[in-house]
Image (spheres, rainbow, N blue to C red):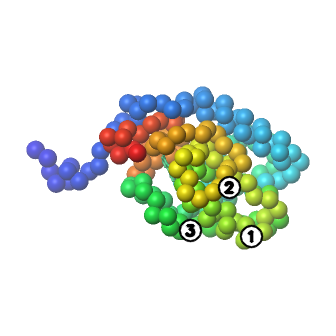
Amino acid sequence: MQTSNQASTPVFPPASGMRILYSKSQISERVQALGQKISADYAGQSIVLIGVLKGAAIFLSDLARAINVDATFDFVAVSSYGRARVSSGAVKLIKDIDNPIERKHVIIVEDILDTGLTLSYLRGLMLQHKPASLKIATCLDKPERRLVPIEADYVGFKIPNQFVIGYGMDYAERYRNVEDIRLFPEEAGGH
Ligand code: IMP
């Protein structure tokens, strides 16, 4: 017999049954390459990596260790899709940067560049602080989904319009700790 509590509990299928889009080792190889590119581009300079919570936390921690120039971290948090995964189009800042970035070389680090609403909002916001330069690094890019014109300077992988989880990315806050990037099944709510 199903209790009312069970009936309202969402189903989270195990990640082990989801198709791997990029394996742990493929991600690691790509992140190393991005780190080398960033290190070359900013050789002899200091950079500020601004991670977008929570999705980019794991990508930032790996990317930062693949970069060999002087770097500091900061984090911002914005309103997310929540469980619905449908963007309202309105982005809200929940947590701002802690330290000034004026005249600093800044890279915003994001998990997925999707419609572009989040990053164009954040880019506008960060530019108000007058950084010396501002670039964007994203683990994944879904160019088909773009609603506003914005491109990242450093892209891990370009992917089609599929919902993914793992490597920091969630479905209803689950699966962030999955090591591979996997396709979330459509029948469970992935688009
Ligand atoms: P944008 O503002 O539409 O570019 O939204 C970007 C944010 O949407 C990302 O930072 C993710 O948090 C979330 N998002 C977009 N696609 C996916 C996905 O396939 N899996 C998990 N989160 C996603």
Quickly name the residue at label 3. Answer: 93
Mark 1: secondary structure: loop
- The quadrant the C terminus occupies is top left
Q: Is residue 149 above or below residue 19?
A: below
Q: Name the residue rendered at 83%, 45% in the picture.
A: 41
At label 1, counting other C-alpha atoms closer than 10 Å, the crowd grade (few under 14, some 14-19, many 20 or more) is few
Q: Is residue 72 visible?
A: no
- Residue 19 drawn at (x, y percent): 44, 30
Q: Name the residue rendered at 79%, 54% in the picture.
A: 47
> Upstream in the sequence, badge 3 or badge 1?
3
Quickly name the residue at label 1. Answer: 129
At label 2, counting other C-alpha atoms closer than 10 Å, the crowd grade (few under 14, some 14-19, many 20 or more) is many
Tell me which amino acid carries mark 1. His
The reply to whether callout 1 and callout 2 are in contact (CB within 8 Å) is: no
- The quadrant the N terminus occupies is top left
Tell me which amino acid carries mark 2. Ile
Task: State the residue in front, 180 or 73.
Answer: 180
> Upstream in the sequence, badge 1 or badge 2?
2
- Residue 86 drawn at (x, y percent): 42, 57
> Upstream in the sequence, badge 3 or badge 2?
3
Q: Marks 3/2: CA distance?
A: 14 Å
| 89 sits to left or right of 44 | left
Q: Marks 3/1: CA distance?
A: 15 Å
| 111 sits to left or right of 43 | left
Quickly name the residue at label 2. Answer: 108
Q: Name the residue rendered at 32%, 40% in the picture.
A: 187
Q: Name the residue rendered at 59%, 59% in the picture.
A: 148
The reply to whether callout 3 and callout 1 are in contact (CB within 8 Å) is: no
Tell me which amino acid carries mark 3. Leu
